[in-house]
């Protein structure tokens, strides 16, 4: 596999993961009550705990996207 193919792979991985993150954010921002009531069926969480868990998940997901997608893409752009 050549560097150009890897570059495009990491670019599209990063792009698609940020689209997923954006969709999750929009769903949480505009349908947070529905998501809360949907998850409340299985988990005994109050609204503050639910918001904290979702915010934590979005932060961890963003960090993982940056570490495993964006940084390798930038490194491949620099390398060549």
Image: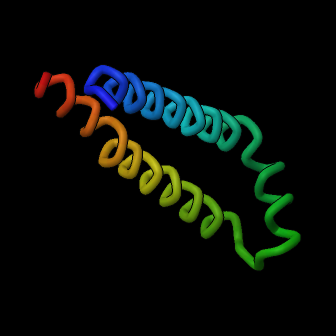
List x then y, in percent, for residue 48. 61, 65
Q: Nearer the viewer, residue 50 or 18?
A: 18
List x then y, in percent, for residue 10. 38, 32
71 sits to left or right of 38 = left
47 sits to left or right of 4 = right
Q: Is residue 1 above or below residue 68?
A: above
Residue farthest to the front? 1
Q: Is residue 47 above or below residue 11?
A: below
Quarter of the image with the C terminus in it: top left
User: How is the rendered protein coloured?
Assistant: rainbow
Q: Residue shown at 56%/32% (left/top)? A: 22
Residue farthest to the left? 79
Quarter of the image with the N terminus in it: top left
List x then y, in percent, for residue 58. 50, 50
Q: How many marks?
A: 0
List x then y, in percent, for residue 20. 59, 36
Q: Nearer the viewer, residue 59 or 78?
A: 78
Q: Residue shown at 39%/51% (left/top)? A: 64
Q: Nearer the viewer, residue 66 or 46?
A: 66
Q: Residue shown at 53%/30% (left/top)? A: 16
78 sits to left or right of 10 = left
Q: Residue shown at 56%/29% (left/top)? A: 19
Q: Is residue 44 above or below residue 70?
A: below
């Amino acid at each position: 596999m050549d560097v150009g193919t890897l570059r495009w792979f990491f670019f599209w991985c990063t792009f698609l993961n940020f689209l997923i993150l954006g969709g999750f954010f929009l769903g949480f921002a505009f349908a947070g009550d529905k998501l809360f009531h949907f998850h409340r069926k299985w988990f005994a969480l109050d609204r503050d705990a639910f918001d904290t868990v979702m915010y934590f998940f979005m932060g961890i997901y963003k960090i993982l996207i940056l570490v495993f997608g964006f940084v390798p893409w930038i490194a491949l752009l620099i390398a060549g």
